[in-house]
Amino acid sequence: MPSLDSRPDPRRWRLSVAPMMDWTDRHCRYFHRLLSKNVLLYTEMVTTGALTHGDVQRHLRFNSEEHPVVLQLGGSDPQDLAESARLGQQWGYDEINLNCGCPSDRVQRGAFGACLMNEPALVADGVKAMRDAVDIPVTVKHRIGVDRIERYEFVRDFVGTVSEAGCDVFIVHARNAWLDGLSPKENREIPPLRYELAYRLKQDFPSLTIVVNGGIKDNEAITAHLQQVDGVMVGREAYYNPWLLTTWDTAFFGQAPSSLDREAVEEAMVAYMERAQAEDGCPWYAIARHMLGLYHGQRGGRLWRQVWSNHKLKPLPPREVWRQAREALARGATLAS
């Protein structure tokens, strides 16, 4: 295990946006980076099979503006994990994260994700193989238990075993994963949150960086968690209410707030849409879907969202859709006043 002095600064993990399948693609991460300079961004889970047998560029391409950005891997074979981690470092990612928390049927059929919590020695082998292959941090995201296993000792022993392989950072989704009987959506809502288990991990492993995840929705909750652990990962709230990210650089990193208002962020996204269309033919609506929460809670926001999500407008250039969206926003604000 490396010395404490050689480990990355744990402040790197102070605040992050969770990896979310079908959501946190490179377009979403570009948008989130406009809102916060410091938040750590994660990719969707990319399986080792997709990298060893698929289109590497499609899965690993990202925008330089996204840094710091983390590649999350799904897999269980140490050799495949090592090769995928090596690719991630070659492509410029700042960290490799191993998914040991996803409960979906597809992941279970591949014998990885949350079911890996039942095999801590295998996870440790994978972590060691990745650490031998790359110079960037290798971290693990996991649950607190599997199915009906609710003993603290289960997650404690998992973290203890994997940390012995050199993993210094554990992102703890503070719910059990039910591998049978619940959908992935239900797995995010039905198993009770038990943050106290993440807190106990920090007490029992004070030299490790412990990040808590699950059901966190506002800065008050973030502040409370940071009294107990090193970092907080926010998931769906960051997606549905993205303007929350604009408060984090000041509240949690001691930096000046962004000078961009919502309109400036929207204009920057329109310019990004135009660039993406010119570079690789990406349609604007594949990008716009990620910013539909930009006017969350604002007057006129509903009419604004209706324009950007209107399928009939797909043939139009993004700047024309933007013009119509601005008109709708103004109209909605007038009606609400």
Image (spheres, rainbow, N blue to C red):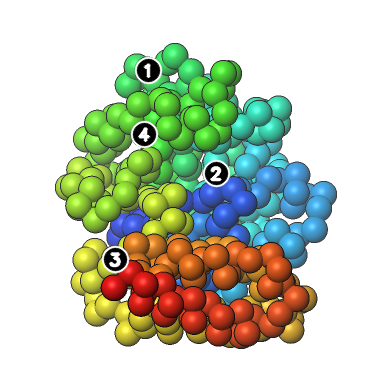
Q: What separation in Å lies between label 4 and label 3 (alpha carbons)?
A: 22 Å
Task: Tell me what residue is drawn at x 57 percent, y 70 percent.
Answer: 307
User: Mark 4 or 2 closer to N-term?
Assistant: 2
Q: Quadrant of the N terminus?
A: top left
* Amino acid type assigned to the residue bearing label 3 in the image: Trp
Count of numbered badges drawn on the protein:
4
> Where is mark 3, residue-wise?
248
Residue on which the image places disc 4: 174
Residue located farthest toward the top when viewing the structure as drawn? 148
Residue furthest out toward the front: 335
Q: Can you tell which of label 4 and label 2 is closer to the viewer? A: 4
Q: Is residue 208 left or right of residue 324?
A: left
Q: Residue at 65% x, 49% y: name it.
A: 46
**CA separation, marks 3 and 1?**
33 Å
Looking at the picture, how far across and down is residue 171, in whole percent? 40, 43
Identify which amino acid the numbered label 2 is placed on. Answer: Leu
Report the mark closest to the observer, 3 or 2: 3
Q: Amino acid at mark 4?
A: Ala
| Residue that numbered label 2 is attached to | 98
Q: Is residue 160 visible?
A: no
Distance CA(mark 2)–CA(mark 1): 22 Å
List x then y, in percent, for residue 268: 51, 83
Badge nearest the viewer, 2 or 1? 1
The residue closer to the viewer here, 262 or 119, is 262
- The spot of residue 180 in percent (x, y) is 58, 18
- C-alpha separation, residue under disc 4 versus residue under disc 2: 17 Å
Sequence-earlier tag: 4 or 3: 4
- Disc 1 and disc 4: Cα gap in Å? 11 Å
Marked residue nearer the N-terminal end (2 or 1): 2
Query: Which numbered disc, 3 or 1, marks the residue that appears first in the sequence?
Result: 1
Identity, as a three-letter code, of the amino acid under mark 1: Glu
Q: Quadrant of the C terminus?
A: bottom left
